[in-house]
Every structure is written in structure tokens, then in C-alpha cells.
């Protein structure tokens, strides 16, 4: 039990299997089994916590949300003379000001021929996610990039703003709805900066 707890502690602090095995004086195979168990426990806990997230619901005030996607894995396969690029991507939603409200999902592998660019997010995928996470009482202001999938009405998003990453636009000041009863606006930045930092952190640990 003590070995398993120590391996879990090393795992969550980002230590490698090799380093942990050296510290413990044990074989890497044993440490790797403990790491796999720790990863399964952390994944189960993340799924449990994610299922309990409620975005917004702060009437009469609105909530600022960011949503974006990123590629976390890729590989190439040559089939019948065509080079196919396969991409594994994550879609994320985060509530600004509350780091506990981060929702992630993998929407599986997509592929592109010859050119290694990730295909655009499908509209039905974003609609499915939005219908799962939001309702009419969410009362959110949405922030995203220019992906066409986000350019559609979904329940709970009162206003939508986007920045054009292809044009090197990362932030833009916007006056958005704040108190819907009093008609009060507030100034904020249209951006996906919070999620961009999250993507960098996730990729650094993969």
C-alpha cells in the first residue's frame, strides 16, 4: 500500500516512471503498473467532477465562457498512394473566474489527406456539447475563435464574440451584456487566452 501511495504522489507531481523507480529501488514494470492505476483514478475523479459542473445560472448577471479545440496527438498513414494525417483533438469549455469549471471532451480522430491540418470542427458536435452543458438559465457570453461551428445559436448563450487567430488576432475589447435586468454592460476581452494556456499545460504533460 505504501508503494502504491508513493507512486500516486510521484505521478500527480509529474515525475517519470524511471525517476520514481530509481527513488524506490524497484523495477520500472512495477512502478508503471502503479502509474497506470493512478492515471485511472485521476481520470475517474475528473469525469465525476466534470459531470457536476453547472455553467452560469447567476441571474440577473451574465457569465463569461470560453470554448475552443486543440490537437493533442497526430500520426500519418499511407494508404493506396495517399498520405492520411490523423488527428486526436480536445474540445474545452471554461468559465472565466472559476478555475474549477473546466469541461473537456475528446471528439475522436479526424483525418485529412496530404496536408496535415486539422479538419474544421463539425457544427453538430458543438451543438451536442452546448445542449449538454447549457440551458436557458445559463445566461452566458461566449468567446471563441472563428471556427464556423461556433457561429450558430445555442441555448443559454446570449451573445457570441470571436477573434481571428488566422489573422494573428488574439484579443479584442468588447462591451458585453452584464446585468440583464438593469441593462448594464461591462467591458471585457474577447479571447480564448485562458484555454490557450490550458492547452499548453496539457500538452507539456503528454
Image (tube, rainbow, N blue to C red):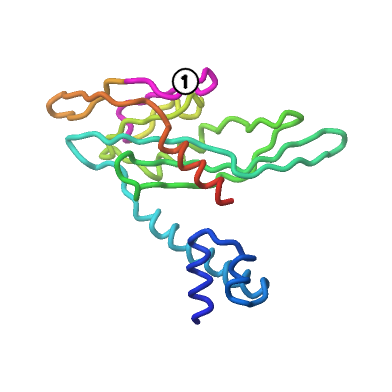
* Left or right of 3, for residue 26: right
Please indicate whether residue 118 sits to the left or right of residue 126 in the image. Answer: right
Quarter location, residue 30: bottom right
Badge 1 crowding class, 10 Å Cα cut-off, few under 14, some 14 to 19, many 20 or more, is few
Residue farthest along the right direction in this orientation: 81
Q: How many marks?
A: 1
**Could you tell me residue 186's position as x and y percent?**
22, 25
Q: Which residues are magenta?
A: 156-173
Q: Does 169 appear in magenta?
A: yes
Residue farthest along the left direction in this orientation: 182
Q: Residue at x 50, y 82 (%)?
A: 1
> Residue placed farthest to the bottom in the image?
1
| Left or right for 79, reference 175 | right
- Rendered location of residue 48, percent (x, y): 41, 60
Residue 15 to residue 122: above or below: below
Check disc 1 and report its element: helix, strand or loop.
loop
| Closer to us: 54 or 191 | 191
Looking at the image, is 101 positioned above or below residue 114?
Answer: below
Q: Residue at x 43, y 27 (%)?
A: 152
Name the residue that disc number 1 marks.
Answer: 169
| x, y percent for residue 43 | 49, 60
Quarter location, residue 162:
top left
Q: Where residue 7 sits: x, y (%)?
A: 53, 71
Nearest the eye: 51 or 172: 172
Was residue 179 drawn as part of the magenta stretch in this picture? no
* Residue 74 versus residue 183 in the image, above or below: below
Compared to residue 45, the image places residue 120 above or below, namely above
Amino acid at each position: 500500500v505504501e508503494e502504491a501511495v508513493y507512486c500516486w504522489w510521484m505521478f500527480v507531481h509529474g515525475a517519470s516512471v524511471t525517476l520514481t523507480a530509481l527513488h524506490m529501488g524497484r523495477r520500472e514494470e512495477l512502478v508503471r503498473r502503479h502509474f497506470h492505476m493512478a492515471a485511472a483514478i485521476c481520470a475517474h475523479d475528473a469525469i465525476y467532477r466534470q459531470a457536476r459542473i453547472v455553467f452560469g445560472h447567476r441571474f440577473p448577471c451574465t457569465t463569461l465562457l470560453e470554448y475552443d479545440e486543440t490537437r493533442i496527438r497526430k500520426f500519418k498513414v499511407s494508404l493506396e498512394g495517399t498520405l492520411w494525417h490523423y488527428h486526436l483533438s480536445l474540445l474545452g469549455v471554461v468559465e472565466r473566474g472559476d478555475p474549477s469549471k473546466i469541461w473537456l471532451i475528446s471528439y475522436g480522430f479526424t483525418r485529412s489527406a496530404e496536408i496535415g491540418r486539422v479538419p474544421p470542427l463539425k457544427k453538430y458536435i458543438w451543438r451536442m456539447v452546448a445542449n449538454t452543458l447549457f440551458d436557458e438559465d445559463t445566461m452566458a457570453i461566449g468567446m471563441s475563435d472563428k471556427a464556423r461551428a461556433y457561429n450558430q445559436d445555442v441555448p443559454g448563450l446570449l451573445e457570441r464574440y470571436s477573434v481571428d487567430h488566422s489573422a494573428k488576432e488574439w484579443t479584442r475589447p468588447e462591451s458585453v451584456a452584464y446585468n440583464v435586468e438593469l441593462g448594464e454592460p461591462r467591458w471585457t476581452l474577447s479571447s480564448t487566452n485562458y484555454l490557450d494556456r490550458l492547452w499548453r499545460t496539457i500538452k507539456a504533460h503528454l
